[in-house]
Image (cartoon, rainbow, N blue to C red):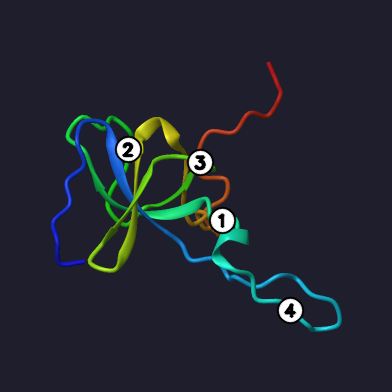
Amino acid sequence: MSVFLRPRNTRVAIRRDESEGMSAGLHGVSIVLPDQAKDKPQKGTVLACGPRCTADLNPGDAVLITKFAGDAFRIEGEDVLVVDQKDIIAVVTEPEPAPSPADRGHGWEYTGGD
């Protein structure tokens, strides 16, 4: 997007992730659904945050939003959703890697004794 978008106050600009647009079919046969019949995806990517946004968000963060949140706009052919920060349910992150066996046991551990 070549346009600079800065949401006001506590609002956040989000690009919704694209949905498949296909129904789950039987025996490998699927039906293409019209736009009106598709559920809008509830996952998106943060594009920009307003100056009073207190949520810990950064551009590029993957987020989950409430189903009917915000106002949709089309800017230079791209669909953008502007929501209030309270409509963001969670930030989706990659899980942290499990500690290697060599790292285990280095730290405080409760053993149950007095």
Q: Position of residue 41 (x, y in %)?
A: 53, 55
Q: Position of residue 99 (x, y in %)?
A: 54, 55
* Local secondary structure at mark 2: loop
* Residue 101 in view (yes/no): no
Q: Considering only order in the chain, which callout, 4 or 2, is on the residue closer to the N terminus? A: 4
The three-letter code of the residue at mark 1 reads: Ala
The foreground one among 83 and 37 is: 37
What numbered label is drawn on residue 68? 3
Q: In this rendering, would 29 be left or right of 74?
A: right
Q: Considering only order in the chain, which callout, 4 or 1, is on the residue closer to the N terminus? A: 4
Name the residue that disc number 2 marks.
Answer: 56
Q: Position of residue 85 (x, y in %)?
A: 36, 34
Q: Considering only order in the chain, which callout, 2 or 1, is on the residue closer to the N terminus? A: 2
The three-letter code of the residue at mark 2 reads: Asp
Q: CA distance from mark 3 to mark 4?
A: 27 Å
Q: In this rendering, would 17 be left or right of 61?
A: right
Residues at marks 2 and 3 touching, judged by CB atoms closer than 8 Å: no
